Image (cartoon, grey):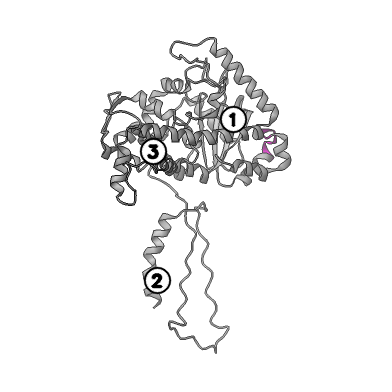
Amino acid sequence: MISRTHARRLPTLVIRSLSTETATSSGPQPPPPPPPSQSKHPTAKPLSRSRLNPAPRPAVSHRHQVLASLPPSFGRNQFLPVADSTRALLESIVAKFEAPIRYAFAYGSGVFEQDGYPTSNPASKDGPMLDFMFAVTHADHWHSINMHQYPGHYPLGARMLGSSFVARVEAIPPGVWFNSMVHMNGVNVKYGVTTVDNLCSDLLNWNTLYLSGRMHKPIRIIKDDARVRLTQQVNLTSAVRTALLTLPDSFSERELFERIAGFSYGGDVRMLLPAENRGKVGNIVRKQGPQFKELYHRLVVALPGVEWPAHSSTIQQDTSPHARAAHLKKLPSNLIKGITSRYASEPFIPPREADETVYWTKLAGDPALPTVIEKELHRIVRYSSAVQTLKGLVSAGPIKSLRYSTEKVAKWWKGSGSSSPSSPTGSGSSSSSGSNP
């Protein structure tokens, strides 16, 4: 009876263990407790086994291993090279933190060159600030350790209220806490802190596009994590599918890169400010074309109906409703939810319950679909950027906020007076030390 019950449950347990993951230690599990001694009650009569008195089920552990590793070649497109001096600087800064960091990357003009900056060297006088993002397991614990090591990184109010307050503010969507204008290893640094769970959720679902949008553009990974690498590959593929749905049957690789890089800027409330550079997307793509191609070329050619020869800068795709439907129904869940809700009242769209294939094909064949996608992306970004901007007043404090805003306006004013023809909107881009994606 026991062996048959266990045999019937075994496939279910295996499937659950493969489909469920929690952030637990990947080390060896403790041994099970020893069976109860049989000598305590030698005269006790063993119970008969029946349907009313069945044998106890064997104990099954519900603790699951985290994703320990991936094949070395998986996601190799994410590991973009930088100069040895830059790599050494980034790694030395991250190594200074005593609080445990599971995943870390650097991004922005201090890592990869952008148009509109006199220099990309963060150690120079007019160099940009270095931007980092750290993903941790437990935010409260991490900030407690970090606040003890670097109390000056936090404003006075946050230090008085403690790490639990910082963690609660961080948890407000989009789920990031920034410590900005910090001096480390001779350069100015800004670092954001989020949890691995929050990061992976945004990479998969585009809940806010705040973190996933940053990672659509070139980043330098400093500390890798298998779970993040896996979800980042999904995020990059989602960006390609979304861009393809908004592009014609033939387009250039630069158009693809600018479309993807612009996802996290459209709808951003900071773009309404006069000190923000509206030409930032072009500035990024013009200088980082090789990095974008390394990120996306393998993913693009792996999709059905898309052709992009390695020696060519022109991309061609099948734009039939059937081909576009294959991309549409695989978009991130938050974006899909917004798109389908906009079409819910359209009379020419059949009910989804009636025929899934016809439903997606009708949506994909609508000429207005690119506009609908763009509006939904703006909606997602607008809310998260507004909330994070307000959170910045708390995480930076009034003095740093005023200082940062003053420097931002000064850079914009200086740059607007020396605009280059290649950047019609002005080459003086704002420092990526802000909360820019």
Is 390 above or below relative to 127? Answer: below
Q: Which segment is the magenta one?
A: 148-154
Residue neighbourhood size for the residue with mark 2, other residues' Cα within 10 Å, grouped as few (<14), some (14–19), many (≥20): few
Looking at the picture, which amino acid does disc 2 mark?
His
Residue pointed to by mark 1: 190
Kindly state the secondary structure of the residue where label 1 is placed.
strand
Q: Tag 1 or tag 3, which sits nearer the N-term?
A: 1
Give the distance between the C-alpha atoms of the residues marked 1 and 2, in whole angstroms: 54 Å
Write the residue at 59% across / 32% down: 389
Looking at the picture, which amino acid does disc 1 mark?
Lys
Kindly state the secondary structure of the residue where label 3 is placed.
helix
- Tell me the tag on residue 6: 2
Q: In the rendered image, is residue 11 in sight?
A: yes
Write the residue at 30% across / 41% down: 362
Measured from the top left, where is residue 112 in percent x and y? Answer: 47, 24
Looking at the picture, which amino acid does disc 3 mark?
Ser
Q: Tell me whether the residue at label 3 lies in contact with that at label 1, contact meaning CB atoms closer than 8 angstroms.
A: no
Kindly state the secondary structure of the residue where label 2 is placed.
helix
Q: Tell me whether the residue at label 3 lies in contact with that at label 2, contact meaning CB atoms closer than 8 angstroms.
A: no
Residue neighbourhood size for the residue with mark 3, other residues' Cα within 10 Å, grouped as few (<14), some (14–19), many (≥20): many
Main secondary structure type of the part rendered in magenta? helix
Write the residue at 65% across / 32% down: 393
Q: Tag 2 or tag 1, which sits nearer the N-term?
A: 2
State left or right for residue 248 relative to residue 79.
Answer: left
